[in-house]
Amino acid sequence: MKPRLKILPCILHTYIILVTAMKVLKEWTIPLPWGKLALVSWGDPRGDPILLIHGRQDSVATYIPLLELLPDKYYYVGYDMPGHGKSDAFPIGLKLSRLHFTPVIEYVAKHLGWTTFTCMAHSMGGEQAMFYNAINPGQIKKLILLDVGLSLQRLQMVPMNEYYKSFYDAHYVDYHKQITERKAYSKEEALKAVVKARGVNREQAEIILSRNLIQIGDDRFVLSWDNRLKLLAPSNYPKEYYYELFSRNSPPTLLLQATEERRGSEDRIQAVKEILTKMEENCGNFLIVSVTGGHDVHLTNPERCAKHISEFLDKDFGKSKL
């Protein structure tokens, strides 16, 4: 039986990680033009590289339960997105878009010296990976998408007046509130808020908050998440454009789709389904697998994802099709 990671929550906002099999090799930061980016690595640095990208208002810590169940022969490196976890936020000023986060992948790959790599990404992280692959074809040799559909719903075309009012006009109306207000919580209040908002249990909420709490007083904490993450401006094009963009030069891809995630309007759900189904039908080695669970199933029920991911990682796509 494979030894498992034991995660012990500290009294503050970090985790002591006692490792028996999947070693946490190190935590470090790198300088980027706007500030520091926090990275964490696990596994065997001699193994094939795998880049981990988390979702919006998460951190790289959300991969820990899944990493317990994955082969330790690979070299896993993840980072906290800007404005998440222990990474600095983008500078204040103009409206942030979802595409602002995509170049971070290139900064990390260059820092690590990776010319090709496998990428595993959740939700908005998967959206970033798909855009990155379209911009830099051939660098991502395998792609694992963890319930990316909810994020892709935000890419759908809407009337320009609605788009502008929602994402740009509102930014300046609430500008000072976005950059100055930061609600303080007790540790217990923060845990209860995450349990309620994310539909996770207490232990899973501890993992989500483990890199996202900053202590400002006696049992008083603020979240490190950038307030502007709540309403990032998406691109605004028809679904046909996204299909053409994402299907061109698509690498072997495993998409794990959570069966219990039905948030969003029905027309957007169907538009994303159409894009992804066409990719499965027309792109070589593109597989969609339904996994019982919610949007964070890789965190809440990692055992339901691990087998599919392990098999995909071990598969040689040189002469085969999924």
Image (tube, rainbow, N blue to C red):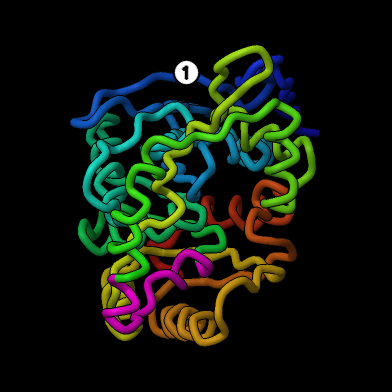
| Most frequent secondary structure within the magenta stretch | helix
Left or right of residue 292: residue 214 = left
Q: Residue 269's image quarter?
A: bottom right
Q: 148 or 12: which is nearer to us? A: 12
Mark 1 closeness class: few <14, some 14–19, many ≥20 residues within 10 Å = few
Look at the picture and state if 55 lies above or below 145.
Answer: above
- The residue labelled by disc 1 is 26
Q: Residue 24's image quarter?
A: top right
Q: Which residues are magenta?
A: 149-164
Identify which residue is drawn at 46% across, 84% down.
271
Q: Secondary structure at mark 1?
A: strand
Q: Is residue 262 visible?
A: yes
Identify which residue is drawn at 56% across, 35% down.
183
Q: What x and y, as percent, mark residue 296? A: 64, 54
Left or right of residue 200: residue 76 = left
Identify which residue is drawn at 57% across, 18% down.
215
Q: Amino acid at mark 1?
A: Lys
Q: 252 or 106: which is nearer to us? A: 106
Q: Residue 210's image quarter?
A: top right
Q: What x and y, as percent, mark residue 33? A: 18, 31
Left or right of residue 198: residue 30 = left
Indicate yes or no whether the magenta region holds residue 157.
Answer: yes
Left or right of residue 32: residue 141 = right
Instruction: For the N terminus, give its image quadrant.
Output: top right
Q: Is residue 73 visible?
A: no
Look at the picture and state if 63 lies above or below 38.
Answer: below
Q: 221 or 245: which is nearer to us? A: 221
